[in-house]
């Protein structure tokens, strides 16, 4: 009896889905919005049906509508994944980076990304030892990442959305200051090298924090005093305190202490989402910008 009931429910669902699909091309926006919401309510299990419909549809306009429906379904899942990440006890940075990448590449496989990061971690780890100075540690990490792996860095360009995404950065060996900086930070964290992202205006800069000052018990020290040196993630070049002071002088901006406080994983991923959203500034793709900003807001919500 239970099997019969289940079969009848499936038949009713199939009928409803078929009926909904015939209305996807309805010119009335209210009808389409109602149909769209009902289709999305089925969840990702309806995606194969939509893909089959797309393949058998001649109308480009209808295909665009189907693509938007599939995107909505993926985005719905992604929102739930980000909510779980936000509420997890350990907010793994690599996991969040892969979620950002899945916004643009929903079928992205995680295994190649995890494998590439692990290879880099292992190659760096083999060159490290307990007797290296902070600068020597960073030289090892930088040499493996930028020379051996041949990672290239560019200034942030919103015409190049792939340069924000970790899967594409690892695949093409080319990223911008933000994505390269996050990859650098990921590797440093995996290797217990005390590197953090700091909040310098108009820059995505890394700082090597003096290991003995990592915790808050040294509250008498300023955030700047805790920093050994700075690292530019575009090239891996090291900067001194004097270099950074000169930057602030050129900018005519006071070097207030808050600029040197390390950013947590939430704020780093918010920055990535906010900057990535700027790649979608035309009318056709503005919904993507809004969705990415909504994800950023979700992460920042208490």
Image (spheres, helix red, strand yellow):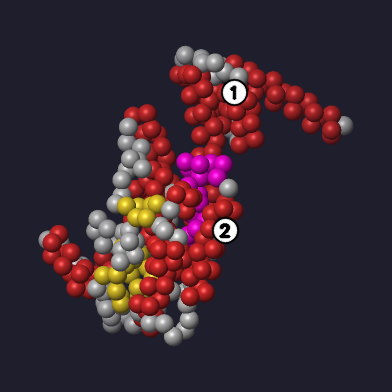
Horizontally, is 219 left or right of 101 in the view? left
Residue 216: mark: none
Horizontally, is 87 left or right of 221 in the view? right
- Asked if one can make out residue 88 in the rendered structure from this viewpoint, the answer is yes
Toward the right, the furthest residue is 1
Residue 241 figure quarter:
bottom left
Residue situated in front as seen by the camera: 4 or 157? 157
Residue situated in front as seen by the camera: 90 or 99? 99
- Asked if one can make out residue 301 in the rendered structure from this viewpoint, the answer is no
- Quick check: marks 1 and 2 in contact, CB under 8 Å? no
Horizontally, is 90 left or right of 15 in the view? left
Q: CA distance from mark 1 to mark 2?
A: 33 Å
Q: Is residue 116 magenta?
A: no
Disc with the residue nearer the chain's start (1 vs 2): 1
Residue at the spot of label 1: 55
Task: Tell me if mark 1 has few (under 14), some (14-19) or many (20+) residues whose alpha carbon lies within 10 angstroms of its own.
Answer: few
Q: Residue at x 32, y 36 (%)?
A: 281
Q: Is residue 99 magenta?
A: yes
Residue situated in front as seen by the camera: 91 or 200? 200
Residue at the spot of label 2: 115
State the image coordinates of residue 261 (x, y, percent, origin top left): 31, 68
Horizontally, is 153 left or right of 247 in the view? right
Q: Residue at x 18, y 64 (%)?
A: 247
Tell me the SS state at disc 1. Answer: helix
Residue 278 figure quarter:
top left
Q: Residue at x 47, y 53 (%)?
A: 170
């Amino acid at each position: 009896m239970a099997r019969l009931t289940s079969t009848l429910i499936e038949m009713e669902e199939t009928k409803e889905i078929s009926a909904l699909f015939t209305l996807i091309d309805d010119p009335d926006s209210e009808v389409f919005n109602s149909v769209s919401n009902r289709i999305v309510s089925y969840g990702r299990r309806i995606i194969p049906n939509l893909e089959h419909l797309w393949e058998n549809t001649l109308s480009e306009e209808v295909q665009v509508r189907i693509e938007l429906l599939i995107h909505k379904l993926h985005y719905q899942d992604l929102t739930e994944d980000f909510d779980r990440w936000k509420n997890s006890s350990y907010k793994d940075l690599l996991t969040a980076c892969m979620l950002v990448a899945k916004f643009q590449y929903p079928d992205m496989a995680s295994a190649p990304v995890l494998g590439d990061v692990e290879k880099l971690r292992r190659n760096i780890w083999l060159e490290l030892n307990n007797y290296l100075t902070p600068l020597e540690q960073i030289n090892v990490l930088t040499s493996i990442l930028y020379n051996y792996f041949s990672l290239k860095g560019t200034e942030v360009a919103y015409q190049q959305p792939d340069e924000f995404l970790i899967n594409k950065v690892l695949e093409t060996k080319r990223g911008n200051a933000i994505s390269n900086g996050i990859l650098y930070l990921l590797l440093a964290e995996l290797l217990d090298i005390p590197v953090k992202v700091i909040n310098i205006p108009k820059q995505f800069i890394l700082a090597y924090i003096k290991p003995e000052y990592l915790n808050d018990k040294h509250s008498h020290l300023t955030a700047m005093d805790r920093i050994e040196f700075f690292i530019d993630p575009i090239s891996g070049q090291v900067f001194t305190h004097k270099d950074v002071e000169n930057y602030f002088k050129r900018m005519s901006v006071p070097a207030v202490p808050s600029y040197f406080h390390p950013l947590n994983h939430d704020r780093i991923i918010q920055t990535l989402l906010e900057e990535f959203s700027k790649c979608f500034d035309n009318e056709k793709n503005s919904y993507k910008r809004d969705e990415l900003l909504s994800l950023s807001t979700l992460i920042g919500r208490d």
